[in-house]
Amino acid sequence: VVKLLLETDKVDVESKDKHGRTPLSLAARNGHETVMKLLLETGRVDVESKDKHGRTPLSWAAWNGHETVVKLLLETGKVDVESKDKHGLTPLSWAAWNGHKAVVKLLL
């Protein structure tokens, strides 16, 4: 369904919910690897978009330990692994805080 919607070119891939999260942020937060790939393939998404708390898609993926999603974002070469949210925490901080060792290794 996501693929079909994206193919119409009538979908705003940078739309935001009431928390300032984009579809890419939500896919990253929830570990939806296939949706992440489809959104990234459009070339129309901002991988560094920040929500109202200053969290990026990488922050959300790291927070929840979604290793494959973190890899996908890192492979774009466009993410800032040192990006801090409004609490001053980086994706590495969130991964470590939540005990996601594999993600910590990726971000080091």
Image (cartoon, grey):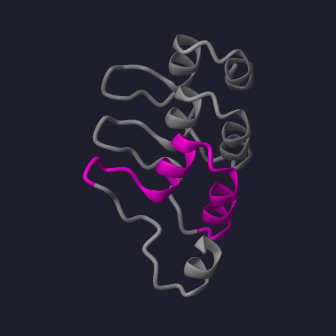
Residue drawn at (37%, 65%), measured in percent from left and top? 15
How many discs mark residues in the rendered view?
A: 0
> Going by the image, does 25 lie left or right of 75?
left
> Going by the image, does 9 lie left or right of 38?
left
Magenta residue check for 24: yes
Residue drawn at (49%, 23%), measured in percent from left and top? 90
User: In terms of image quadrants, where is residue 89?
Assistant: top left
In percent of width and height, residue 105 lies at 74, 18
User: In terms of image quadrants, where is residue 107?
Assistant: top right
Q: Observer-nearest residue: 39 or 35? A: 35
Magenta residue check for 88: no
Q: Observer-nearest residue: 106 or 19? A: 19
Q: Observer-nearest residue: 43 or 95? A: 95
In percent of width and height, residue 32 lies at 63, 50
Residue drawn at (31%, 56%), measured in percent from left and top? 17
In percent of width and height, residue 64 lies at 56, 29
Q: List the single residue furthest toward the left.
A: 18
Q: What is the span of residues highlighted in magenta in the rendered image?
A: 18-43
| Placement of 40 over or under 68, stated as above or below | below
Quadrant in which the N terminus appears? bottom right
In percent of width and height, residue 58 lies at 56, 38
Q: Is the magenta stretch mostly helix, strand or loop?
A: helix
| Placement of 36 over or under 77, stated as above or below | below
| Placement of 92 over or under 15, stated as above or below | above
Quadrant in which the C terminus appears? top right
